[in-house]
Image (spheres, helix red, strand yellow):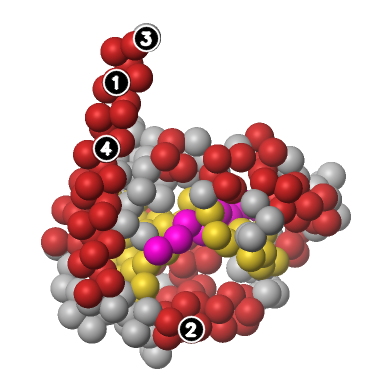
Amino acid sequence: MVEKVVLEKKVLSENDKLAAAIRTDLKARKIAALNLVSSPGSGKTSLVEKTIQALGGEINIAIVAGDVQTENDANRIIKAGGKLVRPIITGGACHLDARMITQALSALDLSGVQLLIIENVGNLVCPASYDLGEDMKVVIMSTTEGDDKPLKYPAMYRRSSVVVINKIDLLGTSDFDLPRAKENALKINGDLKIFETSCRDGRGLTQWYDWLRRFVAAAR
């Protein structure tokens, strides 16, 4: 048991060193960076697709798309108009780490890039512990999940700066309670900024896009 804890600390320490180097490089390039985290099926890829379609003409966006086994998400993003897209297949690992991001970024031409979006593997546990050199984590939950997700996975919500509650077009088709979900999230982290969105009918996306514009401008 003791050996396991020591090993875990060593792994995270090495990861944090790489993440710090990534962050320094991105700041020097004036690239704003987001790490999108969620459970599977919350709509991360759909949100990235919509973002590319809405902002790709005015903001130069690079995407690192992580997945356990396929390049399906990366291919969807490319089809949506993504020009700088790098897939990472973890081969079973439940999270991305800074070493993977370093390798992915080395394969991208970052000159002129203003926004880096990292789509993490769908998992609300492991990605919370791994710094990828991002400016902030954005946790996405959906109305097809339980409104108690923030209470069940507090580390993820505590380490995130933004919550996107997606699929609000499906409100009323399940027991998901939107006010309770927001209350639960703010119980864990009172500083969270919350968006309510539907990637299907577009509700709330304008506010998300406006926030992204300000986020990118702040990094310049």
The residue tagged 2 is 213
Residue type (three-letter) at the residue carrying disc 1: Val
- Under tag 1, what secondary structure? helix
Quadrant housing residue 161:
bottom right
Q: Name the mark on residue 13.
A: 4
Q: Quadrant of the N terminus?
A: top left
29 relative to 53 in the view: left or right: left
Q: Looking at the image, is mark 2 or mark 3 nearer the viewer?
A: 3
From the viewer's side, name the closer residue of 179 and 10.
10
Residue type (three-letter) at the residue carrying disc 3: Met
Q: Name the mark on residue 1.
A: 3
Q: Looking at the image, is mark 1 or mark 2 nearer the viewer?
A: 1
Determine the CA span between mark 2 and mark 3: 47 Å
Q: Residues within 10 Å of mark 1 (few under 14, many from 20)?
A: few
Q: Residues within 10 Å of mark 2 (few under 14, many from 20)?
A: some
The residue tagged 1 is 6
* Residue 141 drawn at (x, y percent): 63, 52
The span picked out in magenta is 135-142
* Residue 71 drawn at (x, y percent): 31, 52
Determine the CA span between mark 3 and mark 4: 19 Å
